[in-house]
Amino acid sequence: MFALIDCNNFYASCERVFQPQYEGKAVVILSNNDGCVIARSNEAKALGIPMGAPAFKFRNEFKKHNIKVFSSNYPLYGDMSNRVMKILETYTPNVEIYSIDEAFLKFEGFDHFDLFTMGLKMRKQVRQWTGIPVSVGLAPTKALSKIANKIAKKFDQKTQGVYCIDSNEKRLKALKWTPIGDVWGVGRQHAKRLKAMQVKTALDFVNLPDEWVKKYMSILGLRLKKDLEGIPSIQLEEVVPSKKSIATTRSFNNILTIFNNLEERITTYTLLGAEKLRKQKSCAIALHVFVRSNPFDPKSEQYRNGCTITLPHATDSNFILNRYALMGLRSIFKPGIEYKKAGVILLGLTPSFSRQINLFEQDTAKHTALMETLDKIHRRYGPHRMKLASQDLKQTWKMKREHLSNRFTTEMNEIIRVK
């Protein structure tokens, strides 16, 4: 049997753990630079606040309905996620952390256990130890456990937050209840094609011929169909794959027009990306730099451009990556433009231990030692402690986060004070 454990309204729940006065009240979380809504409590959903709603357009709605607004607090969310996952790992060694708020568990050798009772125990323990509410879906396959989880969450009062598909009758009923667009693994384009064929539910999908599914949805679609039939075909991914690219992009608080200001931003983004690169023990063989004006300001001249640069060899060095990132910026910078956003994307990632060098490569062993020392300093004393000369040494550029809560679990100066 598989179990999918999903944290309910995770970002909002993290905020409520440390500020329980907002329990039962409408809460929304905003994206970087307080741009748009990326998470909502059930109460906010009921008030009609859509996902992705631009914050500046809904400011009056927030005020009218007394909706509590938070800026995204990723250090807090990441730490709370880690606490939840550590609890789940005590139930079985077979765990796949699917996202920051979801995990698949595989129960092998649990034939004589009451998994429904175990699901209730997991739910109670996670809530008691972390304060985070979760829903648990149990089924013979991963795809069915996804559907079981949706049922547990949708009918929380009736299911006690835990639902188990343990019979063919329950499986067929669940498939008939699930719209095809809500099936895990069925993307927007496939859903559009299937609806055109009058395939409206997951049950309609499993009734399609295997040959058609394999032809038009590849072997992955066929595996999904078998999973929904109750035949385990999608297994746990026990090793989390490294990212194939790393992007660091931001919109600016203010309009930038001077090259030196853009240069500082691109350098900062490159270094942030390089740190992520080293964290997953990878090197990049290419990078993409882009800039653009404000598309929402019709009065300003519209401009967007980018360029991709292939590096002479795979590297994770701040110095080399930044040198070529600034070369790219110089080639696309256009004077007189009011720039609102820029970014750096590191491409062609390969493992550090197997990177390909060339005959004319300079020795960068000293870069490796220096980068290790730099990362240790930042881990111990915080980010932005050491900078390159092309960065602003007197100013730390920060995202717009006017509604940021404390980092209650990761910053000693911001922990809860008990009076």
Image (cartoon, rainbow, N blue to C red):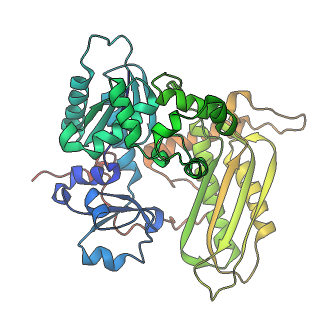
- What x and y, as percent, mark residue 82? 37, 37
Q: 170 left or right of 202?
A: left
Question: Residue shown at 35%/19% (left/top)?
Answer: 92
Res. 399 visible in picture: no
Towards the viewer: 43 or 66: 43
- What x and y, as percent, mark residue 117? 21, 24
Q: 222 left or right of 98?
A: right
Asked if 278 appears above or below 77 in the picture, the reply is above
Res. 401 visible in picture: yes
Question: Residue shown at 72%/50% (left/top)?
Answer: 321
Count the labels in the image. Answer: 0
Q: 231 left or right of 194?
A: left
- What x and y, as percent, mark residue 376? 51, 40
Residue at the farthest left position? 419
Asked if 309 appears above or below 86 in the picture, the reply is below
Asked if 133 appears above or below 414 in the picture, the reply is above
Question: Residue shown at 38%/75% (left/top)?
Answer: 58
Which of the 4 quarters of the picture holds residue 367?
Answer: top right
Towards the viewer: 229 or 281: 229
- What x and y, as percent, mark residue 180? 48, 45
Asked if 13 appears above or below 233 in the picture, the reply is below
Which of the 4 quarters of the picture holds residue 331?
Answer: bottom right
Towards the viewer: 345 or 234: 234
Position of the N terminus by quadrant? top left
Q: 332 left or right of 175?
A: right
Residue at the farthest bottom position? 299
